[in-house]
Image: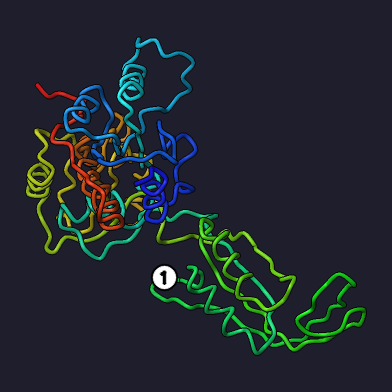
Amino acid sequence: MKLKEIISAFEQYAPFLLQEDYDNSGIQFGDPESEVTRGLVCIDITEEIIQEAIEKKCDLVISHHPLIFKGIKKLTGRHYTERVLIEAIRNHISMISVHTNLDSVIDGVNLKLAHKIGLAGLNVLQSRKGLLRKLVTFCPTDHAENVRAAIFKAGAGVIGEYDCCSFNLDGKGSFRAGDNTDPFVGEKGQIHYEPEVRIETILPAWLEDQVVRAMIDAHPYEEVAYDVYPLDNSFDRVGPGMVGNLSKPLSEMDFLNMIKEELSVPFLRHSVFTGKEIKKVAVCGGSGSFLRDHAMAVGADAFVTADIKYHDFFDVKNKMLMVDAGHYESEQFTKEILYEIVSKKITNFALLISDQSTNPVRYF
C-alpha cells in the first residue's frame, strides 16, 4: 500500500483544504510513493509512540495532532519533536496527521464526542463561509442530461439533504469555429447559433477540480464555456463544534457526573451553576472556548470543551453551564475515527490502535 493511498482516504473523508491556517495536517514525514504495510493510530506522536510502532513492526503512524507545527532548522535531538523525527527517520516510519480538517467535518471529532455523551438532533455549531462554489456551463439541449449527470456524480448539486440540485435555463448560444478547430456543430468560419441549456449548480471548493473535469469529459463541445463563482454562503455541513439534545433533561450535577463517567475524566472545571436543567448541549473537542458565544446564541444549556481561560467563566455566569473536560479527554475518541476511515476504505491494510495514553496532563 502506498502512503499516498492512505492520504487519499483521509482527503475524501476530511479534505485537507478545511484545516486552519495555523495547522499542519497531512504527511509529517515520508515519501507519498513509498510502500507502507502496517499502521499505528494515536492522538499525539511521542517518543513512546514511535517505540510502540517499532515494537509492533509498524512503518506508519497516524495521529490526530501534528508532530510539526513550527519550522525545524536543525535535527539535534534537543527537543522531543526532533528526537521523534530522528527515530522515525532511523526506523523508516512515515507519519500522517489529520487535525483541524477532521474537527471541521460534520462526521468528525465533534460528532463522535456528541454521540459518546448521548446527544441527538445534531447540527454544526458554527457553520463556515467561503467554502462553496457555483458552477455554470452552457450545453446543447440534447446533451444537457448527460452533462448534469456527470456533474452530479462527481459530487456537485448537494444542498442539505437534497442532491442533484441545479437550475436550468433554455437559451441560444453563438460561436464561430476557427480554421484549426473540429466543431461539434456548425461550420468553420461561419457564425453558428445553437439551442443550449444554461446549467447552474453548487459544489464544495475541494471538489472543484474533479467536478470541472467530469463536466468537460461529458461535454460534447471541443471548447467548453463555464464559470466558477465563489460564494459567501454558510456551509452548514462544515465548521467547528456541534449542538444537539439529550434524550431527557438532567440536573447540572447529574450532567457533570455523566460527563465524568463517559469521558473517564478524574475531575471537571466548570462555571457557576445556573440552576437550570440541561437539555440542549454544545460540544467542541479540544480548545473550543472561542465558540462560547455561539453556544449561548443557539440557546445551549451547557457547553463542553477544553482549555477554557479563567475570564471566560465570568462571561457565562447565570447564562450557561460551561465545562472544561480536558483537551485529551474530549478528543480521545478520535483514534476510533482515524481507524474507521482507513479500515473501511482500505480493507487489506493492517492497522492498530495505540494502547497508551499520550495525555501530557497529570492530575493530583
Location of residue 192 in the rendering, given as x and y in whole percent from the top left corner: 85, 85
Residue density around tag 1, few if under 14, some if 14–19, many if 20 or more, within 10 Å: few
Residue, x 65% and y 90% (percent of image)? Answer: 142
Q: How many marks?
A: 1
Q: Seen in the image, is 209 located left or right of residue 281?
A: right
Q: Is residue 6 visible?
A: yes
Q: Position of residue 170 (x, y in %)?
A: 69, 88
- Residue 351, given in percent of the width and then of the height, sits at 22, 45
Image location (x, y in percent) of residue 29:
40, 31
Residue 211's place in the image compared with 32, above or below, is below
Residue placed under numbered mark 1 in the picture: 160
Does any portion of residue 319 appear in the rendered image?
no
In the image: residue 266, left or right of residue 134:
left
Residue, x 16% and y 52% (percent of image)?
A: 116
Q: Residue at x 21, y 63 (%)?
A: 120
Camera-nearest residue between 268 and 179: 179
Which one is nearer the viewer's eye here, 320 or 100? 100
Q: From the viewer's perspective, is residue 342 above or below residue 213?
A: above
Check the picture and name the quadrant holding the C terminus.
top left
Q: Is residue 104 above or below residue 178?
A: above
Residue at x-position 89% and y-position 79%: 188
Say which amino acid is labelled 1: Gly
The scheme the figure's colours follow is: rainbow
The part of the image, by quadrant, that contains residue 36 is top left
Name the side, left or right, on which 233 lies relative to 286.
Answer: right
Quarter residue 125 falls in: bottom left
Front-most of residues 317 and 292: 292
Q: Secondary structure at mark 1?
A: loop
Residue most toward the right? 189
